[in-house]
Image: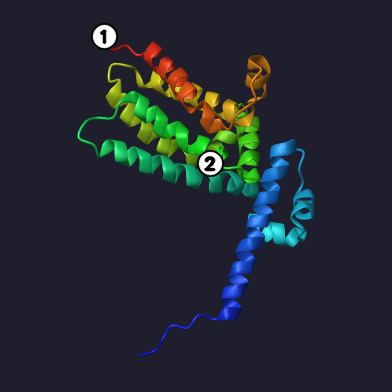
Amino acid sequence: MTENIEDPVTDGRVLRGEATRERVLDAAERLFAAEGFDAISIRRIAAEAGVTLGVVSFHGGTKHQLFATVIERRVAALNADRRARLGVLLSGDKPPELRDLVDAYLTPYLTHASRGDPQWRAYARLIARIVSDDRWYPEIGNFYDPVAQEFLDAIQSARPATPRKELVTALTLTVAAMLSLVASRARIAGLSGDPAGEPLAYRETLITFCLGGFDAISRES
């Protein structure tokens, strides 16, 4: 019987390659978040990551491809968390309440953003920057939309008399409120006179606010 023996040289190269790729993506994420896609060059990203131009191209492809990859790796984590929460809700004995569905959609992002990871903070700034720029929807919309549709199906079951388009609009506005809250809480702090908390500290207020929007457009009797 032949044993599978890992090659330490090969394994080391793979690990170094993965670490380099993450460094490239992190650098691109920070720069895109700080200055926007158009202002950043591959050369800037290479300098920020401490690698050559060829290394950036190897791990990221074109600038557009690199941008999409930066977004996709965060969305993958969010999608996994959201699907897990939705699965738990749908496996219950009763159909999920709308509040629980809104909570399941919002809380994963609030949680990631509250862990103190500067790269997630950079992602939050980046998404807040591009959310109103429709040119990116054809490239990155497919990262988010499948899970959003799964939640909309469950939301439609909770509000069957409400037209789908109105529910889509309410969910879109819910996402906008979530992104705005995570990207900056400075105005809340300024107007309230209290120090800004982590995004999770505003969880219940955000859920209540967004749920009110769904309830307002609902045509349930």
The three-letter amino acid code for the residue at tag 2 is: His
Q: From the image, which quarter does the N terminus lie in? A: bottom left
Q: Position of residue 2 (x, y in %)?
A: 39, 89
Please identify the quarter of the rendering in which residue 189 is found: top right
Q: Nearer the viewer, residue 194 or 153?
A: 194
Which is in the foreground here, disc 1 or disc 2?
Answer: 2
Residue 112: give its label.
2
In the rendered structure, which disc, 1 or 2, sits on the residue that comes first in sequence? Answer: 2
Dot 1 falls on a residue whose secondary structure is loop
In the displayed image of the protein, which residue is found farthest to the top? 221
Whether 211 is drawn above or below 197: the answer is above
Whether 90 is drawn above or below 214: the answer is below
Q: Position of residue 166 (x, y in %)?
A: 40, 18
Work out how far the residue at label 1 is from the one at label 2, CA to CA, in angstroms: 37 Å
Whether 115 is drawn above or below 18: the answer is above
Circle 2: is it few (<14), some (14-19), or many (20+) Cα within 10 Å?
Answer: some
Q: Are marks 1 and 2 in contact (CB under 8 Å)?
A: no
Q: Which residue is mark 1?
A: 221
Please identify the quarter of the rendering in which residue 156 is found: top left
The three-letter amino acid code for the residue at tag 1 is: Ser
Circle 1: is it few (<14), some (14-19), or many (20+) Cα within 10 Å?
Answer: few
Q: From the image, which quarter does the C terminus lie in? A: top left
Dot 2 falls on a residue whose secondary structure is helix
Which residue is at a point 47% across and 38% down the rendered structure image? 108
Q: Position of residue 113 (x, y in %)?
A: 57, 38
Which residue is at a point 43% across and 83% down the rendered structure image? 4
Which residue is at a point 64% across and 28% down the rendered structure image? 184
Q: Position of residue 147 (x, y in %)?
A: 41, 38
In the displayed image of the protein, which residue is found farthest to the left? 93
Which residue is at a point 56% across and 42% down the rendered structure image? 115
Q: Is residue 37 visible?
A: no
Residue 139: give its label.
none
